[in-house]
Image (cartoon, grey):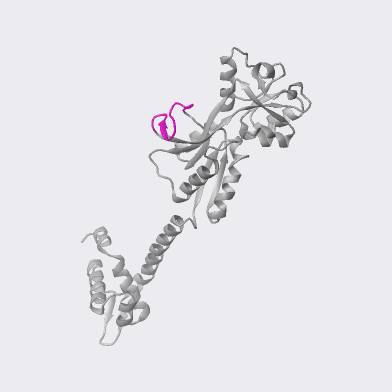
Amino acid sequence: MKCWEAHINVTLKQVRAFVAVVQSRSFAEAAVLVHLSQPALSSAIKVLETTIGGPLLLRTTRSFVLTPEGESFYPVALRLLADWDGAFDSLHQRFALRAGKISIAAMPSFASNQLPIAIRHFKTHHPEIKITLNDVIAEEVVAMVRSGRVELGVSFDPSDGKAGSGKQFDGDDLLFSPLFEDRFVAVLPPGHSLLSLKELSATQLLQSEFISLQAPSRVRQLISREFVRLGLSFTPAFETHQLVTIGRMVANGLGVSVVPSLCQAQMHELGAHCRPLLEPTIRQQVGIITRRRYPLSAACQAMANTLQDTFFNAEFENSNNY
């Protein structure tokens, strides 16, 4: 018999029977330990010895001794059983959400403002799950999910609303599950003349110097597209990579901007003020992005459920906060 064929024919029951006999020094006690009759126990060990090609135990009328091969195999058998039991215990812990880790990606506007709320809820119920958060621009969220570097991403709808809820897009390799709709808002410095108005238009904003994210930011693309659609020239006076920098620059009187309403609380903390933007009205679905053909781990599915429970159809615009 070929070596690999012998490995296939050796069973876990046979290995457990051998270890139980060695540890208990008694066939009768070993039979009880592994829940077998004595004849079934002896048969299991005999089949094991036949399969591997020689004796592991030399039996006497009242006892037995290990052969040199049995002595050599015993510690290996212990490791095999420990690895086997450990593997199944680890799987059980993961399915029970008492162990494991997940890696997710989220665009900065969501990662720094709303996501900590969901993570707090998740950790309350699953404190042993480790979470790695990648705070990256919307385009990179999609790229990280597509490449498998993260299981789950939260970003704007990559299909720009064309795919719809739970539909595939971009070659049918990704799925988008909407959480809520974000409506962009205008951001103004303290003391700005437009703060006297309850609602603003792009035309009014462009009377001041405009601060924007740099390309290829999805936020930049959405704002530019809508401004141009109204026949307005979109030529920012300042450009930056981070929304928090926009907030600080606006708060310091360097200009005005437009940001996702996700950032309202952050803008207020930085000292800027927000107003509804009505012309154009810029709306964009925010949701969960996953790979279509790859099921989520139990831990990551629990996180997706937490995101749905926390944010589905959430409203982040609150007129009292303007």
Q: Is residue 217 something one can see in this rendering?
A: no
Quarter of the image that includes the N terminus:
bottom left
| Image coordinates for residue 97, horizontal then vertical, percent | 48, 55
Quarter of the image that includes the C terminus:
top right
Is 170 magenta? The answer is yes
| Image coordinates for residue 267, horizontal then vertical, percent | 69, 33
Q: 183 or 72: which is nearer to us?
A: 183
Residue sitting farthest toward the bottom: 62
| Residue 45 versus residue 26 in the image, above or below | above
Question: Residue, x 26% and y 85% (percent of image)?
Answer: 60
| Residue 153 versus residue 123 in the image, above or below | above
- With 71 as the anchor, is 288 left or right in this view? right
Residue sitting farthest toward the top: 231
Q: 291 or 258: which is nearer to us?
A: 258
- With 80 as the anchor, is 263 left or right in this view? right
Residue sitting farthest toward the left: 1
The image quadrant of residue 83 is bottom left
Q: Is residue 28 something one can see in this rendering?
A: yes
Is 165 magenta? The answer is yes
Q: Which residues are magenta?
A: 159-172
Question: Residue, x 29% and y 69% (percent of image)?
Answer: 14
| Residue 137 versus residue 94 in the image, above or below | above
